[in-house]
Image (spheres, rainbow, N blue to C red):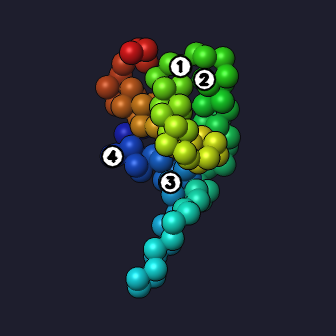
Amino acid sequence: GIDRFHHPKKLVAFSGVDPRVHESGKFKATQNRMTKRGSSKLRQALYTAVLCGLRKSRNTRLIAFYQSNREEGKPHKVVMGACMNRLIHWIFYMLKRKEAFVEA
């Protein structure tokens, strides 16, 4: 269950949605991609959930998060990854607190 994860970032890493950091000496990469080292089925489910939440206008909080990131000039795929990450955080805290999702 969710109790095996002590922090939402652990669940993010398990899903493989976390950014891969590439640094060496003074070099620091400006484009970091998803690690994709976790569960591919969980990643696919998260992507589908985000896509449905955005397209069907079911999740206003997610839509607002998506739009604010796009307005910053971030590409669609980067923002989709950020939305998946945000969704994992919401799910983690809902399961930990045993509460239902409530639209703001």
Horizontal and vertical percent position of residue 55: 67, 22
Residue at 66% over, 17% down = 56
In contact (CB < 8 Å): disc 4 and disc 2: no
Identify the amino acid type marked 4: His
Residue 77, x across and y down, in percent: 64, 46
Residue drawn at point x = 41 percent, y = 85 percent: 25
Q: Nearer the viewer, mark 3 or mark 1?
A: 1
Badge 1 crowding class, 10 Å Cα cut-off, few under 14, some 14 to 19, many 20 or more, is some
Q: Position of residue 27 (x, y in %)?
A: 46, 80
Q: Quadrant of the N terminus?
A: top left
The amino acid on which the numbered mark 3 sits, given as a three-letter code, is Asp
Is residue 62 at all visible to an observer of this figure?
Answer: no
Q: Secondary structure at mark 4?
A: loop
How packed is label 3: few (under 14 Cα within 10 Å), some, or many (20 or more)? many
Identify the mark nearer the N-term, 4 or 1.
Answer: 4
Is residue 36 shown above or below 84? below
Q: Which mark is residue 59?
A: 1
Q: Which residue has dot 3 on it?
A: 18
Quadrant the C terminus occupies: top left
Q: Earlier in the sequence, mark 3 or mark 1?
A: 3
Given the image, on which type of amino acid does mark 2 rest? Gly
Residue holding disc 4: 6
Q: In the image, which disc is placed on residue 53?
A: 2
Q: Nearer the viewer, mark 4 or mark 2?
A: 2
The local crowd at label 4, few if under 14, some if 14 to 19, many if 20 or more residues have their Cα within 10 Å, is few
Q: Answer with mark 4 or mark 2, whichever residue precedes in sequence.
A: 4
In whole angstroms, how far apart are the C-alphas of marks 4 and 2? 27 Å
Mark 1 and 2 residues: CB-CB less than 8 Å, in contact?
yes
Q: Element at badge 2?
A: helix
Distance between the alpha carbons at the discs numbered 4 and 3: 16 Å
